[in-house]
């Protein structure tokens, strides 16, 4: 159709999910990828210690690393869910029924940069509302013994 000033306009065809997925596939197929570690060295050390302590306490429990909140939290509000969906917790303690009961955040040496405090506040509030515990392990301040004591407090004997 024509506007009053004579310009021609065409209605844009709406982008479907299939179109969007096809576009993503095209972009991904044209880009290089490499594998990289899921955890850095200090996170891997915490994971190993945490995993050993959890298994020793209750072999039915599991430690998961880098878990998206959207995988274990739900909200009927689409925007609220969107605010947490892509955020991750460093470690999640999962009970034998595959429910995350506690989230553990590793505060490494470079953690408190930029908007980290605001992002953590969003995670804490969503976890609190879902009844999931939030705990912090601080680099250079949390000993292996303190980590085991935390596990003993959070995980029932199995």
Image (spheres, helix red, strand yellow):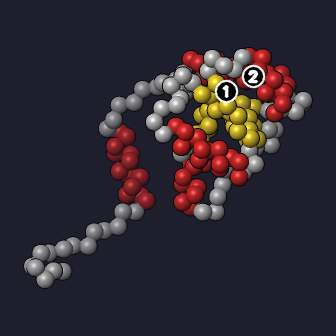
Q: Residue furthest right?
A: 157
Q: Secondary structure at mark 2?
A: helix
Examine the image and state in which quarter residue 138 appears: top right
Q: Residue furthest bottom?
A: 4
For image coordinates 67% across by 23% down, the residue present is 47
Nearest the viewer among 112 and 37 is 112
Q: Which mark, by number, is residue 137?
A: 1
Give the answer, above or below, for where 42 lies relative to 65. Answer: above
Examine the image and state in which quarter residue 99 appears: top right
Q: Residue furthest left?
A: 6
* Residue 74 pos. (x, y %): 66, 55
Is there any visible trace of residue 33 in the rendered image? yes
Q: Is residue 39 left or right of residue 9?
A: right
* Residue 3 pos. (x, y %): 15, 80
For image coordinates 60% across by 44% down, the residue present is 121
Give the answer, above or below, for where 1 lies relative to 69. Answer: below
Say few, some or many: other residues with alpha carbon within 10 Å of mark 1 (under 14 / 14 to 19 / 20 or more): some
Mark 1 and mark 2 residues within 8 Å of each other at the beta carbon:
yes
For image coordinates 46% across by 25% down, the residue present is 35
Which image quarter holds the N terminus? bottom left
Say few, some or many: other residues with alpha carbon within 10 Å of mark 2 (under 14 / 14 to 19 / 20 or more): some
* Residue 9 pos. (x, y %): 18, 74
Residue indicated by mark 2? 147
* Residue 19 pos. (x, y %): 37, 57
Specify which label sits upstream in the sequence, 1 or 2. 1
For image coordinates 90% across by 30% down, the residue present is 158
Q: Secondary structure at mark 1?
A: strand
Q: CA distance from mark 1 to mark 2?
A: 8 Å
């Amino acid at each position: 159709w024509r506007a009053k000033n004579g310009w021609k306009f065409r209605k844009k065809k709406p982008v479907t999910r299939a179109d969007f997925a096809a576009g993503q596939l095209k972009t991904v197929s044209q880009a290089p990828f490499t594998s990289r570690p899921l955890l850095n060295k200090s996170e891997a050390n915490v994971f190993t210690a945490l995993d050993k302590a959890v298994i020793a306490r209750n072999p039915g429990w599991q430690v998961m690393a880098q878990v998206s909140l959207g995988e274990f939290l739900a909200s009927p509000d689409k925007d609220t869910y969107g605010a947490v969906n892509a955020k991750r917790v460093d470690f999640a303690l999962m009970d034998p029924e595959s429910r995350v009961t506690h989230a553990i955040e590793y505060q490494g040496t470079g953690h408190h940069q930029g908007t980290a405090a605001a992002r953590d506040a969003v995670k804490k509030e969503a976890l609190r509302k879902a009844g999931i515990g939030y705990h912090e392990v601080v680099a250079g301040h949390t000993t292996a013994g303190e980590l085991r004591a935390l596990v003993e407090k959070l995980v029932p004997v199995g």
